[in-house]
Image (tube, helix red, strand yellow):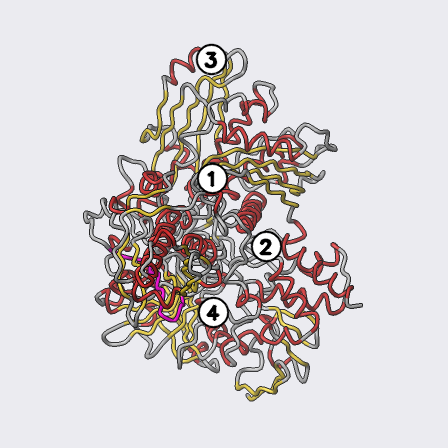
Amino acid sequence: MAITIKVNGVDRTVDVDGDTPLLWVLRDVLGMTGTKFGCGMALCGACTVHIDGVATRSCITPVDSIGTSAITTIEAISATTAGAKIQKAWLDREVVQCGYCQSGQIMSASALLATNPHPTDSDIENAMSGNICRCGTYLRIREAIKQAAQSSGQRG
Amino acid sequence: MILDHLTSRITDPDRSPSTNDLSRRTFLQVGAAAGGGLMLSLSLPFANGDAEAAGTDGFTPNAFIRIGSDGKIALTMPYVEMGQGTYTSIPMLIAEELEVDLKQVELEHAPPNEKLYGNPLLGGLQATGNSNAVRASWQPLRQAGAVARTMLVSAAAKRWNVDAGSCRAHSGEVLHPPTGRRAKYGELAADAARMPVPKNVALKQPKDFKLIGTPAKRLDTPAKVNGTAVYGIDVRPPDVKIATLAQSPVFGGRVKRVDDAAAKAVKGVRQIVRLDDAVAVVADHMGAAKKGLAALKIEWDDGPNAKLTTDTVAGELEQATLKSGAVAQNIGDVDRAMASAITKVEATYQLPFLAHATMEPMNCTVHLRKDDCEIWVGSQAMAWVQAAAAKTAGLPLDKVIVHNHLIGGGFGRRLEADGVTRAVEIAQHVDGPVKVVWTREEDIQHDMYRPYWFDRLSAGLDAKGMPVAWNNRFAGSSVLARWAPPFFKDGLDPDTTEGAINLVYALPNMHVEYVRVEPPGIPTAFWRSVGPSHNVFVTESFIDELAAAAKQDPVAYRLALLDKNPRAKAVLALAAEKSGWGQPLPERVGRGVSLQFVFATYMAQVAEVEVSKDGAVRVRRVVCAVDCGTVVNPDTVRAQIQSGIIFGITAALYGKITLKDGRVEQTNFDTYQILRMDQAPAIDVHIVQNFEPPGGMGECGTSAIVPAVANAIFAATGKRLRTMPVDATALKQPT
């Protein structure tokens, strides 16, 4: 059936079963491969996108459950204030290794920062512990989020 | 993850000289580049394997440096980026000697060039693993950079009719300071290609390094933070179909019956492919493929391994350690020393099968045509990919084109081409390109696993408690014997024994034997930190047991055995000092130490752990001291140590693959847990500065942390854990 979703500000109509996870619509139907597949069960966070600003695991989100909500993916996160700060901090702190999980990490971190500009260590752990990194970049992720939060403070 | 020893043998002759006789090895050829410019072709020793062993000394280049007339410097090299920073460290070596900025060097993926990868015996050893990239290329890439620089300077001197000695290279230009003339490399490249190749080039002294040793920004990072980086799983050839699969849950089993009616009815499902031991669903997208897979009714014939359990495997290995094996190392007379020892200590250790669980699940895209085959994949071993595809498809090697992509985690998993074989088998039934993607469950249940190990040790101590005899016999799989058979000789291979022999400690009588046992029904493979991932746990746990038996401090006990090994002694002392070793800690908190010399790098770690009343272990802090010789990119060294430690803690606390009824019991990240941010310790890395040849960095952190954690648990609770992962029930505080 034809389903219309709004991805990064653009309406996209796809012809798939309504229970198809958003992840596969993004990756295989729309060709937006920045969002990654890791587990298929919301255990690792690699597939994280924003739905109306909320960090959401796209691998268990049926495409027909989204309605008119706004989907934001890694491809467009730099257009948000929090996303741009997080990406810059990721580069400044040399967070990335293999990089495969980092789309999801950045989406979780930017959702955190957008709602909580000055997260505590425990806020960061709560927001980020659903995202697995097999390269073990957690220490740098934490530092990068703190750096991004500091830059929020400086801008007032 | 191929031979450490092979690498060191090849690089040893060049350990220190600053002037290098280039004629000693035919590793470099220089000529004109197509389209003008200077082309250097290199045969990097490690990547091309052991030419001697392969029975040829022919020149087979596998790395290229092209300086174009437009001034562009392009490097094509055989190593792959898996997150370890190789795409930054390697260009640093060339840029240093070529006198260009790092950002002037553009890196290109090793091309799918059948001539380059056409000889499986030679090219088959082309692999990124065993922490070898910087170690193997340290000398040849700097030499190549120096040769190119020398020829560019000569070309400028000739053009200006001045003495080459009065010119110098700087930042991509040749300068003639007396006259102020200057020329960019691009303008000189075509002329340089016609200059004689220098017989000797002077390499820079470490004090003159501008790039090496400085924290360079990773070159591969920007695309990885904005979603544009393309991993194997992201490729989308036109009209590609997506397939996912169910393989026989028991290794060696077969498909008996398939009812695919419901699967075929799923919207988007195009085709069901039935193989001997697997069924694949081909669809328009992975959502439909997975839905189709769930709708399949498959009956399996489990075959000969239907009853296999982990206990069966462990029992066979235990029995094997009661028989004699191949002698890996013998020093002195252990039996005599044991007979005269005052105290005897005996212990057995076991380590479990482990999955790699790379974040990017296994995948491979294949377009099989009548006369040729195209493969898209992220691989640590391109030549294996090509060979596997050619064999399965029944095509000559030169009809298989391989596109290599970024790797979403390797850790040894992507040194194997089993996934390529499977994808080509499926592609043989599909018209057009097909991307085969493993579900996480298939990825974990059909991995090739870190071998299970059983180790039997005994030691004799003298009146002062110091070891006078050390006996170690261990049994398990030899990965190298399968992966590169020529390196398994007389019952031994250098990977399986690394970390069990040539210990850092002065042991007057030592005897180490290895018994090769290949378990039925479960394939084994290299896993981050390879042989040492097993051996360092055992030897560093056992030395800790000896210290305890001698009622001595674990650090002091080790230091007393290190008088002849100053680099090892220095890292141990540094780690102890920085960790606050000896300072009091709360109840059920303890510090544990480990020391190793593997991958040509010295490393000591102190782990501080807290054991809760119910036995849960938390690693609070890790202090690591490392001497890896010359540091090319210190930020990468720190990153790799942090990474290796987290990877090792995952194994120590959670890592276990078990078999029941021939099936792997773990399925996804709920049953095969990975350390998360809220459990990650603080990690302090202290780097010893020197200019010894570089050691490997990608794996040391992993092998060192596991015994440090086990030793810290002993310090915290008095309980010695001789198997991994940590068994919380054994650590429960009695009430």
Q: CA distance from mark 4 to mark 1?
A: 36 Å
Q: Report which residue position mark 4 lands on.
A: B230
Q: Report which residue position mark 3 lands on.
A: B341
**Closer to the eye: label 4 or 1:** 1
Q: CA distance from mark 1 to mark 3?
A: 42 Å
Q: Position of residue B516 (x, y in %)?
A: 34, 38
Asked if B11 appears above or below B321 in the picture, the reply is below
Q: Are marks 4 and 1 in contact (CB under 8 Å)?
A: no
Residue drawn 31% across and 42% down? B10
Q: Chain of mark 1?
A: B
Q: Report which residue position mark 1 lands on.
A: B691
> Quick one: label 4 or label 1, which is nearer the N terminus?
4
Task: Tell me the SS state at disc 2.
Answer: loop
Q: CA distance from mark 4 to mark 3?
A: 61 Å
Q: Is residue B221 magenta?
A: no
Residue drawn 43% across and 78% down? B283
Task: Using residue B225 as the reference point, say whether residue B37 is left or right of it.
Answer: left
Residue drawn 67% across and 55% down? A143
Q: Are marks 3 and 2 in contact (CB under 8 Å)?
A: no
Q: CA distance from mark 2 to mark 4?
A: 20 Å
